[in-house]
Image (cartoon, grey):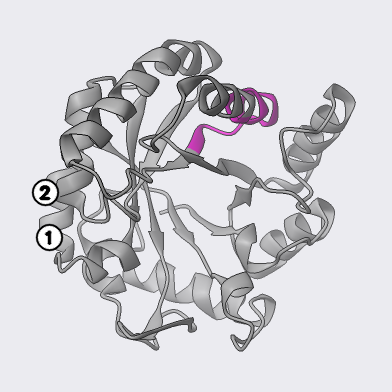
Amino acid sequence: MPIAFSTLGVPGLPLADALRLAADSGWQGLELRSAPGEPVHPGLGPAERRTAARAFTAAGITPLAVAGYVGIAEPGPDAPLLAELNGQLELAADLGAPYVRVFPRGGDGPAAGADARAARRLTATTARAAGLGVRILVETHDSHRSGHDLARLLATAGSPAAGALWDLMHTHLAGETPAETHRALAPHLGYVQVKDIASTADLTPLPLGTGVLPVADCLRLLPGGSWVSWEYEAPWHPSAAPLPPLLPTGAALLRSLHPG
């Protein structure tokens, strides 16, 4: 089971340092937060992208995903959203990343309207994504927090170039067991994000295996070769322990739970 960690846990860390941290602590990939202030974002020029891609190759680390913040079902006009998403897709292709992460953000209106917006936008971009060799993954989050809701959205879209990113915390908060989520998302699944928290009322990130999330139950459901990424939400929780010292034991735990 190849493992990655999200650079959300080390906000602003230069790419060379993040790659060194991954290699030194037993991780095979990075999930790249694409946002202002981060070393990887769509504003990088061609030379900077080539330099970043070469750095991944030299370090032997996989750029698993460009984790952007597009809300694929968000109310509003399509054009600016599609322009942003196309920028993320091009960045992923230039880096050699197989995935771009998007959120649902369907709002408070009827689910059918949110699903239809997402389907329209995914239909407009999946051919481009497929041509670039990149898959768009919608995360279990906000308006489509459960695997059941996300599977319904993806069925409406109906494209193999659009899939699911299973964030274990959000499906747990939605009241789903890992088995229920897996049944819903298995046909669409790109990879899984794991994390741990103190309780459903306290989302402060904890070292893997020390909180309430069913990490082991989730990993047991995954076939061999499935990518798993640890998303440690440090920016939203200033009291959380620094991530870097936790990475070696986190990697060892994930491999002990799913050695395949």
Q: Amino acid at mark 2?
A: Arg
Q: Nearer the viewer, residue 100 or 3?
A: 100
In this rendering, the answer to whether 241 lies above or below 31 is below
The quarter of the picture where residue 135 lies is: top left
User: Which residue is located at x 80 percent, y 38 percent?
Assistant: 52
Quadrant, the N terminus: bottom left
The secondary structure that most of the magenta stretch takes on is: helix
Q: Secondary structure at mark 2?
A: helix
Q: Magenta residues, as a range?
A: 88-100
Q: Nearer the viewer, residue 167 or 111?
A: 111
| Residue occupied by mark 2 | 183
Q: Position of residue 225 (x, y in %)?
A: 37, 46
| Residue occupied by mark 1 | 179
Q: Label 1: few (<14), some or many (≥20) within 10 Å?
A: few
Residue 187 visible within the image? no
In this rendering, the answer to whether 222 lies above or below 42 is below
Q: Position of residue 18 (x, y in %)?
A: 74, 59
